[in-house]
Amino acid sequence: MTWPIIGWTGRTKPVIMDDVSEVVRIPLGGGGEEPAAPPAPPPTSDWFTLAARAAVGVVALGAEASIQILRVASGTPERDLGPVTPDNVALITGAALGLAIEAVRTAATVAELGWRAAGPPASFLIGTVSEAPRRAAVDLVGRWNQSWREERPEVEAAANAVAVEATRRAIDLVLDQLDLTQLVLDHVDIERIVASVDLNEVVEQLDVDAVADRLDIERVIARLDLAKLSLEVIERIDLPEIIRTSTGTVASESVRVVRMQTFGADRAISGIVNRILGRSATGEAADPDDLDATGE
Amino acid sequence: MSETEPPAILTVPAEARSFQGERAGIVSRVLANAIDFAILVVVLGAGYLGWSAWLFLRRGASFRFPTVTYQGTYVVGAIVLTLLFAIAWSTTGRSYGDRLLGLRVINRRGERLGFAPAFVRAVLCVAFPPLLFWAIVDRRSVQDLVLRTAVIYDWAEQVRSVPPPDPS
């Protein structure tokens, strides 16, 4: 027996058990404390009350026992039969015992009630004659009840353990049949959950340095097209211009000016010629046999 | 980016990039040729002085400056200029005048001329200089039309790494 019986016993004790024990305790407690004194015959109304309580107790105990038996029967897997069986036996025995106790007590009560109602004049005589067996019966029942009461926590614990195990397996079985992820996706508004999370706080608790330590920067760099990046940077900052302005001499600047001026002159002459010949300004560039490796 | 082809960095000023690769006009080409001619004169003068020095060392007291005839100067000048052009066009793609003016001579595939085409073009240019002036009309001299060559603006110092488009 490896289940945590003790922990479960107190928590899952059904309320109806308390009622039953209350019902049972009242008449038996009195009988147990004063076994030698001749018991005063209780009034008829008390007998009715006792009978009603007994009936309720019987029904309650019977229901409890039935439920536990059902739990054991339906939830205990085959492979666990070994460790569970003694508890099942104890449970069933306890339940049967309780049933028997209540049945005997109720029968005695009803018989006495009937006897008293049938023969009031002879009741005293017969009551005196039958007092010994009645008391013996009550004592026997009391002992049975006491033994049941002593065994009851263990029986309850076993029943609870069986019930817990059975429930656990049933839940596992149900969960195996469900796609929980899909259920969550279908029915849970993840956007709302995420919106309720304060990401800034999470980030504040994050050790960014540690993350950076774990980064493989070499691999990141390897994925970059550094040459293209460099070209873009050079283009953006106009590096050739910087080089020219920083190292350029008067001569190179003069050459540049001369080149630009001759280019302007070329263009001007081409414009004049084109106007004279009635060509478009781009006539010389529209030649299909153009050799220019423009590439620009 | 493949490692076989390093990126070409433009060293051309921004204002001149738009017309790089276009055919050069007549002014640029005449100026370039004028500079080349001036260089030819310098080379010829240096050659004359060198020849004179050699004669001086050989003859000593009987030395006289060698007589220079017009025909001789013309012939020698033509040969020297032809060699200068052919070597320049087939090696760097540009004579010194071309370099100063930012010009380059290419063939119809956009490549530098081989020595033979460069030599033929140099002979034609030196023998028939006036044919250059067809470039006023077409931006191509008659030599260019015959040899299917071109003179383009190319201010970049290094040879253009961008492959030319297929002219077919």
Image (cartoon, coloured by chain):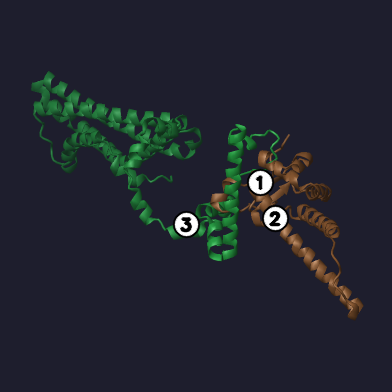
Chain colours: A green, B brown
x, y percent for residue A83: 46, 40
Badge 2 element: helix
Quadrant that contains the C terminus of chain A: top right
x, y percent for residue A150: 30, 42
Along the horizontal axis of the image, is A164 left or right of B36? Answer: left
- Please tell me which residue lies in front, A175 or A86: A175
Asked if A130 appears above or below A25 in the picture, the reply is above
State the image quarter where residue B137 is shown.
top right
Say which amino acid is labelled 2.
Ala
x, y percent for residue A74: 42, 28
Quadrant that contains the N terminus of chain A: top left
- Mark 3 and mark 1 in contact? Answer it, CB < 8 Å: no
State the image quarter where residue B88 is shown.
bottom right
Q: Which residue is mark 2?
A: B34
| Number of numbered tags placed on the structure image | 3
At horizontal 60% and vertical 49% (from top left) the residue drawn is A263
- Please tell me which residue lies in front, B131 or A180: B131
Q: Chain of mark 2?
A: B
Q: Chain of mark 3?
A: A
**Among the two numbered marks 2 and 1 on one chain, the one whose residue lies closer to the N terminus:** 1
Q: Chain of mark 1?
A: B
Along the horizontal axis of the image, is B151 left or right of A216? Answer: right
Along the horizontal axis of the image, is B81 left or right of A230? Answer: right
Along the horizontal axis of the image, is A282 left or right of B123? Answer: left
Query: In the rendering, which numbered label is found on residue B26?
Result: 1
Say which amino acid is labelled 3.
Val
Q: Classify 10 Å Cα crowding around label 2: few (below 14), some (14-19), many (20 and above).
A: few
- Please tell me which residue lies in front, A91 or A27: A91
Query: In the rendering, which numbered label is found on residue A211?
Result: 3
Q: Classify 10 Å Cα crowding around label 1: few (below 14), some (14-19), many (20 and above).
A: many
Tag nearer the camera, 3 or 1: 1
